Amino acid sequence: MTDEASLVFRPPREPRPIFAGTAAHRFPELRGPRVYLDRLRVHHLDLASRVIEADDGKIYLPDLLIMSMMQRSYGLVEAVIDCVDGYNLAAAAPLLRIQLDTLVRACYVAHHPLADEVVTALLEGTEFRRMKDVDGKSLTDARLIELATPHHSWLPPVYKETSGWVHLSVNHLSVAWQVTGDQFNFGLPLPPDVVPGKLWLELLEAMTKATEELFGYVELWESRKGLPLGQARGWPDAEPEPSGG
């Protein structure tokens, strides 16, 4: 590896500063939630290390899935922070939708009696939608949402709303054009004053909730890793350490 290749653009443990002109600077109510989400970003590193080190560092099939979910989640959280900072709603909302996608799959695997079989199927290239649950139903996104809802009652409406940002829809039309009387206004890129602070706050809070609840499943595996069925070990407090800001 060359010295250039080993350079880190943004060291992962460094807090992401709130610059003048960004959304959390423009809307003060976003500052706390944005800083806390950044702390969750950093906490991915500590939680992943704990899971890898559990049971003397032995690696099991669920570890492969858990670590891929953690890597994906870290990237999504970091990207959402960047998108909120830059008023990029067209990217931020789909990224939240992807995090929900991770959460419902973690929920399914955590409640599956034979998690190893799910991971093995994934390693063999079988997509979730090609698998079937214990009732013989295909694991489509709709089915995964249905199965996750008893554990995450807040999820369905958020999933539905963010799905509208994945596919070109009325969401994009309503944000792209602002109507004042008989005047149509359009800005490219999206002007910062179009999206209210309340919407950014809801997005940050939903991303935070999805990430925290994903961590819950990761901690559940940490507590059971390498132990006989029905046994569990204690684990450290999940509260992330302050990262400043």
Image (cartoon, grey):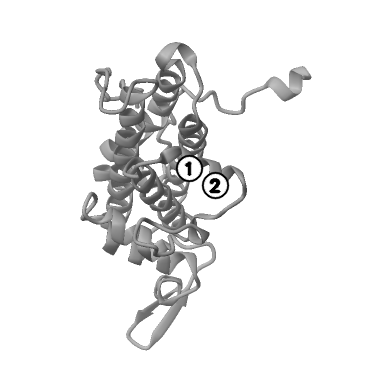
Which residue carries the number 2 mark?
Answer: 121
Q: In this view, does 106 lie above or below 192?
A: above
Which amino acid type is marked by label 1? Glu
The reply to whether the C-beta atoms of the residues labelled 2 and 1 are less than 8 Å apart is yes
Q: Quadrant of the N terminus?
A: top right
The image shows residue 50 at horizontal and vertical percentages of 40, 18
Question: Helix or strand or loop: what does disc 2 sit on?
Answer: helix
Q: Quadrant of the C terminus?
A: top left
Residue occupying image coordinates x 45% and y 40%: 73
Q: Residue furthest right?
A: 2
The image shows residue 230 at horizontal and vertical percentages of 25, 27
Q: In this view, does 44 lie above or below 211?
A: above
Mark drawn on residue 90: none
Q: How crowded is mark 2: few (under 14 residues within 10 Å), some or many (20 or more)?
A: some
Instruction: Calculate the distance from the C-alpha at mark 2 to the C-alpha at mark 1.
Output: 6 Å
Q: Can residue 194 be seen in this view?
A: no
Q: How crowded is mark 1: few (under 14 residues within 10 Å), some or many (20 or more)?
A: some
The image shows residue 11 at horizontal and vertical percentages of 54, 23
- Front one among 57 and 171: 57
Mark drawn on residue 117: 1
Question: Helix or strand or loop: what does disc 1 sit on?
Answer: helix
The part of the image, by quadrant, that contains residue 193 is bottom left
The part of the image, by quadrant, that contains residue 232 is top left
